[in-house]
Image (cartoon, coloured by chain):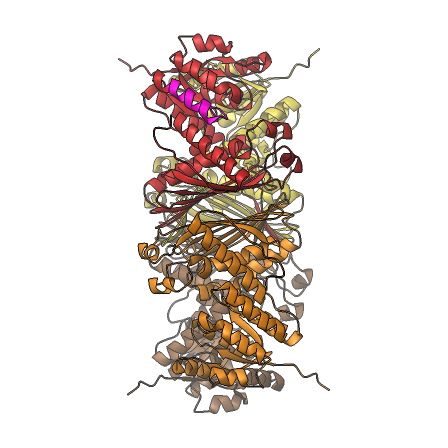
Chain colours: A yellow, B red, C brown, D orange
Amino acid sequence: MTTRRATLKVGLLGAGRIGRIHGQNVAAHRDADLVAVADAMPEAAAALAAATGTRVASAEAILSDPGIDAVLICAPTDTHADLIEAAVSGGKAVFCEKPVDLDAERIRRCLAVVERSGQPLMIGFNRRFDPSFAALEARLRAGEAGEIEIVTVISRDPSPPPVDYVARSGGLFRDMMIHDFDMARFLLAEEPIEVFALGSALVDPAIGAAGDVDTAAVLMKTASGRIAQISNSRRATYGYDQRIEVHGSRGMLRAGNIHETTVESATAAGFRADPVQNFFLARYAAAYRAELDAFIATCLGGTAPTPSGRDGLKAQILADAATASAKTGKPVAVSLTEDLT
Amino acid sequence: MTTRRATLKVGLLGAGRIGRIHGQNVAAHRDADLVAVADAMPEAAAALAAATGTRVASAEAILSDPGIDAVLICAPTDTHADLIEAAVSGGKAVFCEKPVDLDAERIRRCLAVVERSGQPLMIGFNRRFDPSFAALEARLRAGEAGEIEIVTVISRDPSPPPVDYVARSGGLFRDMMIHDFDMARFLLAEEPIEVFALGSALVDPAIGAAGDVDTAAVLMKTASGRIAQISNSRRATYGYDQRIEVHGSRGMLRAGNIHETTVESATAAGFRADPVQNFFLARYAAAYRAELDAFIATCLGGTAPTPSGRDGLKAQILADAATASAKTGKPVAVSLTEDLT
Amino acid sequence: MTTRRATLKVGLLGAGRIGRIHGQNVAAHRDADLVAVADAMPEAAAALAAATGTRVASAEAILSDPGIDAVLICAPTDTHADLIEAAVSGGKAVFCEKPVDLDAERIRRCLAVVERSGQPLMIGFNRRFDPSFAALEARLRAGEAGEIEIVTVISRDPSPPPVDYVARSGGLFRDMMIHDFDMARFLLAEEPIEVFALGSALVDPAIGAAGDVDTAAVLMKTASGRIAQISNSRRATYGYDQRIEVHGSRGMLRAGNIHETTVESATAAGFRADPVQNFFLARYAAAYRAELDAFIATCLGGTAPTPSGRDGLKAQILADAATASAKTGKPVAVSLTEDLT
Amino acid sequence: MTTRRATLKVGLLGAGRIGRIHGQNVAAHRDADLVAVADAMPEAAAALAAATGTRVASAEAILSDPGIDAVLICAPTDTHADLIEAAVSGGKAVFCEKPVDLDAERIRRCLAVVERSGQPLMIGFNRRFDPSFAALEARLRAGEAGEIEIVTVISRDPSPPPVDYVARSGGLFRDMMIHDFDMARFLLAEEPIEVFALGSALVDPAIGAAGDVDTAAVLMKTASGRIAQISNSRRATYGYDQRIEVHGSRGMLRAGNIHETTVESATAAGFRADPVQNFFLARYAAAYRAELDAFIATCLGGTAPTPSGRDGLKAQILADAATASAKTGKPVAVSLTEDLT
């Protein structure tokens, strides 16, 4: 007698850039089947379906298909909350790209629906699954740095997005720094109670004209006095700069970037190494795989996924606070208690 | 009117560890189809065929199938030369894992058959395709280090192979250092004319008892006076240590290892980073893909593959010379001229 | 005819730890003579006088000696302003250890006396003279990082000072971070207009009980939107951690620590390097020499010294603002205009 | 009652570049007095005497002065053996710059005189005293790398010496690589029994025309099978390249170069660090001080100095063997037994 291995039947909503990554990772996963792909652009859905050997379906068909156990939501942000509600109401586990919504109130209502449904919801904060960042966090939890005192997160994109994207993005704090708010929470192991933010438009004046910033820094404090520093830039000439550093009573743990190659030259001009990996899909390729592994294992194992919907809400609350702080010039108190919803 | 993209039909002979790597890379390649897999162990062939969506066939059937354009030879070393001869005689392009044979005379006869056939033969010296080593070589050819003076190749395996493997391996110089002979030739851009070798059994006395060494170093010189240093160990506690360094008139280029993660700790004990990648299939995963890309492109483009059968023969001649030098204690002259065969 | 080389006659007020460093550097300088040493502790003065081949004198005698061109003030902080005033009024150039005073008003009055005297006053912000930090600043000024966007200063002491020192130190922002405020100004090339500070007592509860903090972070903004981040800790298990990083439109420049040796080990536990230099006098030994070189050259050349008394005042104003911000929880506006005094 | 601290009275023979370094280190040493300086060039002796506050004397006067305990020999190589013999016969301890002589037979006769005299003789192999190399060796002796298997020494000068210097230097193996032979012996902890050398004139054809090489590599083996690799170049565009690496059963220890500053830039062209220290007097400044410390402590403590005259002889024998090997193309057996003299 052989033990039959459970397989998760997965539908994908959204076949854009990140949808393609997740779709291919599901298709290659031994514990999951990608059973259908939907996209508002039929050719996008068809291309991904062909590449992964699956079929195209409408979002509605996927959401109402009783043979589908879980959906991955990679559609535009403004559809996330509705799709999550429909999916969990239809008895499906959900993996949703960040953010649930740009409006914290809408997120709260959505999470209430999720919680009533009893279905798992996981939010795509992929950086928690970067092998180096995940290893750092595990070593932190094991006490290698002792009591945590200062968490530093540096995040710099290679180049700014188009201004029209910026205009509907919710602003840098919600669109870009939200990953760093989640990372700071992940590392701090204690909720921030205060957020102070500074922002400037130094990279592209058009971003400033659109009411946003492209260069920003945040200070946060927890109740016990731990401090988190975050800095962001929408431009880095030397690659996609993603670093974390945690200082504690026993020492420091840090992790960072990967150079394009290991080649180093030494000439009269000095020693030279390559830029760091430039493209987020390459930089975080392993993280995207590990994230899906975790979602699939969670669904099959019946355990609660992390980062959860509440993690998504908390990051959003911090991003809102930072946005307000940068506007008003004052620190903003936040309360990330457990009865958020 | 659309241009039809050519697709290479590939058969795989040998579904062991390295065969599975190549088989999966062919199966995932957009310009190639893996059409059949053969292995003396039927379950191995069946498992790989299932994983790649292809069929099992006998080696004979693959070699005689007119619909197959190219074969990948990943079978045991003592079958390589016969399989190459059969394949090229059947009009197929061949990719063969190193070495063609442990006997240089047998290689010469085989290459004669290959050359008469007009079919391309590529040898699997995968390290030339490591992205960092390949980038280093390209920058060397572009003159970044000036005139080459000293080439250093360091190669240390995490742990020694079983003694019974050692006994039939042809010895460290032919089994392990052969990769470094090829790398030295790749970097030197000039043929060695002399080989001096030292070897010891320091890692495992049983290796010495079996007549082999596990720790070795070689010096080679070219006609113009360029020097190559190679060192090998069958053991490295800190991972799979693979480094190259080239010193020239304008400076130095070097490339090396990748740590398991980017995490660094700093405590009272100092700064600590992870060991380097430990497993050759992980360390050279990108190299294996790039190697197959090159083979497939060569076959479809009608150009001559590199490294060629002659490159395989030349590395074997250097390995033979090193083996003789280590035995006799004397340097051995070699002549890697173009009329080798 | 030979040109006679000018020699600066220097008197030293204070033969404690830092006084000994400066005294020995003057004594070894080819353009200066250490002509007298004063200290409230006669043995301290005598020991340093013996070691440098000079004589002991009272502070009063040094200040009134017409043969002395310049004095170095290395006495306790609460004597600095009075000694500066006496020295410049007596026609002497002055090098004074930071700070001029813990009270900005007292500094203003002192600088008014200095400015009326026409004598040069240089403040001992030694870090500007660290060869790596000075080189970084020069490359920044040459445009290598483009327009400056984010300046980051990290400063962590190996271990906290005694609590009784803390109690009379003026607090972490004035005692420790004042160096980082000066460094931020040095690198930003534009004055901060706002300071927000967070502080906690995480290292030693007794420091908190004494009304101070031992872990702190600051955000500052300039009028054009440049951002500076500073973080401090009174403890670092892995050495004296002193790093700067500047991000700009063309890239990043950073500089940092020196390991105790260059030895690196690689074992099954990974790669290990030494802690970084642990003692500030060793870490900044070259900076102390370069600082005195600059002071002596300035005095002999008749040029204005940098960092000036106004630089000292500006750093103090930022430290005061940070102290107030940490107490009130609000950002504090500052105006470091040229008519400060 | 106070304990009187012993002070070593030192005379210096030779006030050239290296003599000035040693003279200043003795003058600054608390346990030694520099009592006289001799040089064939009176102005050189006078300048150093003035800088160190001592007097000029003739070599004969120094050698016959009963008030002088020890002499430092920094005169031209061809005077070393005679001066050593005169000094030890006069009851003085001797520190002599390498080499004792270019002729091993002359060294043997000199050492016989030294041994009969009972006076200590220390040879200036300064690299053993480099803080990083010394720390590495201590950790090796403590077993951190386990059983030693492969020792690698890399030594590259920034630029070749004048050809007329080359012509009377004894050749690269005796003039430059002799330091590396000593370092290899220091690290191997077992005597080499065989030397194989390759050399080429790749940097400067005039060096080849003068009968010497400027690029060289050596392989050595010990009785138990340990292997040493040495490579030398008379040119390195990126600084004075001095590295050691030891591989053993438990792992690897390595140490190397120090960059001119810690500044690192990151731009679209990649990451760039400074060249390494370019000048041997700066690179080994700490080593020269530690070497004199050891000599002075040895003289005052009545213990035997290391590296000894025999260490000097053994390095010379290895250099002679390498010179012969490079000429004949054959490995040369050596026997560095204890009854060398």
- Which SS type dominates the magenta stretch? helix
| Residue A23 higher or lower than A132, as above or below | above
Q: Nearer the viewer, residue A32 or B160?
A: B160
Q: Residue at x 34, y 57 (%)?
A: D207
Could you say where residue C260 lies in the image, as x and y percent from the top left?
56, 60
| Residue A161 higher or lower than B149, as above or below | above
- In the rendered image, residue D154 lying in the magenta stretch gets the answer no
Does any portion of residue D165 appear in the rendered image? yes
Q: Nearer the viewer, residue C328 or B314?
A: B314
Could you say where residue D50 lies in the image, as x and y percent from the top left?
44, 84
Q: How many numbered discs sit on the rendered protein?
A: 0
Quadrant where the image shows the N terminus of chain C: bottom left
Q: Magenta span covers which residues?
A: B99-114
* In this rendering, position of residue D65 left or right of residue B67: right
Q: Nearer the viewer, residue A176 or D316?
A: D316
Does any portion of residue C239 appear in the rendered image? no
Query: In which quadrant of the rendered view does residue D44 lie?
Result: bottom left
Could you say where residue B166 lies in the image, as x and y percent from the top left?
60, 30
- In the rendered image, residue B109 lying in the magenta stretch gets the answer yes
Q: Nearer the viewer, residue D295 or C113?
A: D295
| Residue C244 higher or lower than D306, as above or below | above
Q: Residue at x 43, y 33 (%)?
A: B128
Could you say where residue D151 lies in the image, as x and y percent from the top left?
55, 50
Quadrant where the image shows the C terminus of chain C: bottom left
Extreme-left residue of the structure: B1
* In this rendering, position of residue A21 left or right of residue B239: left
Q: Residue at x 45, y 71 (%)?
A: D78
